[in-house]
Amino acid sequence: MPRAKNPPTMVWMRDRTAKTRPVVTEEKIVRTAIAIADAEGLDALSMRRLAAEMDSGTTSLYRHVASKDELFELMVDTIIGEQPLPEPTDDWRAELAQLARRQRALLLLHPWLAQQITRHPALGPHVIAHADHQLGIVSRVTGDPTLATMVVDTINTHVLGAVSAELAELEAQRRTGMTENEWRDWVGAYVRQVIESGRYPHFTRRVLEADDTDPATRFEFGLECLLTGIEAALRR
């Protein structure tokens, strides 16, 4: 069996210090890429599009960024690095909740970020620093690193799941051109048929009696349930 091709050296293991003061810099490349992704999504981002946006040649970009995957890695780490790490307190639950809310806000500000984190976990210095900070909070409550890791992973999964659902709803509105109220009017006749059939009593109560909740309220409810369950697990 032929040997697998050696993977390229990770961007974080190379000397990325500029030897001169070039017109095109790694920071400018990354910032321009983030702006394109924020405005149009990751699918709109290519090295050719990036070069055109910067009025530069594609070859000039490759002197700083070896590949598109490397560019994504730098973009994620740059954005995570813009979040200052909060000072520790004596309330670990409040600290984890604050970090979760900040993460949600960041993912909503950069809609492509949740997709990229899920697709390819980043390992840049800022990402690792934030992960270390989260683990440090939980480690004040438990000395078990496996349990601390599962706590952090559980909270991060909640954030990613909640934000992904919220972004999917916004994308559906953009794609169909219908607001949520317009969509409800569109499906209203069918839902009435379902209710009148009498076959789905619990679904009927949900439609007729349950309050409408916004994404932030649902996020906070899920976060509170998680933290309460985590606290009980850590006390065992």
Image (cartoon, rainbow, N blue to C red):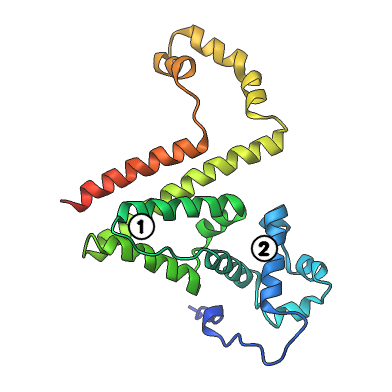
Establish if 15 lies above or below 197: below
Q: Tell me the CA gap for discs 2 and 1.
A: 27 Å
Establish if 86 lies above or below 184: below
What is the count of numbered marks? 2
Q: Is residue 10 visible?
A: no
Locate residue 175: give its quadrant: top right
Q: At 66% across and 75% down in the image, what residue appears? A: 27
Amino acid type at image mark 1: Val
Other residues around mark 1 within 10 Å, as few (<14) / some (14–19) / many (≥20): some
Other residues around mark 2 within 10 Å, as few (<14) / some (14–19) / many (≥20): many
Left or right: 230, with 34 as reference point: left
Q: Is residue 36 visible?
A: yes
Q: Which mark is residue 34?
A: 2
**Residue 151 x, y percent position in the rendering:** 31, 55
Q: Nearer the viewer, residue 200 or 149?
A: 149
**Residue 199 x, y percent position in the rendering:** 43, 11
Q: At 65% across and 41% down in the image, what residue appears? A: 171
Q: Which residue is mark 1?
A: 152
Q: Secondary structure at mark 2?
A: helix
Amino acid type at image mark 2: Ile
Label 2 vs 1, first from the N-terminus: 2
**Residue 157 x, y percent position in the rendering:** 42, 51
Left or right: 88, with 217 as reference point: left
Establish if 203 lies above or below 30: above
Q: Nearer the viewer, residue 89 or 56?
A: 89
Asked whether the residues under the numbered discs 2 and 1 touch, taking CB atoms below 8 Å apart as contact, a structural biologist would say no
Establish if 28 lies above or below 36: below
Q: At 78% across and 82% down in the image, what residue appears? A: 23
**Residue 143 x, y percent position in the rendering:** 21, 65
Q: Which mark is residue 174?
A: none
Locate residue 89: give its quadrant: bottom left
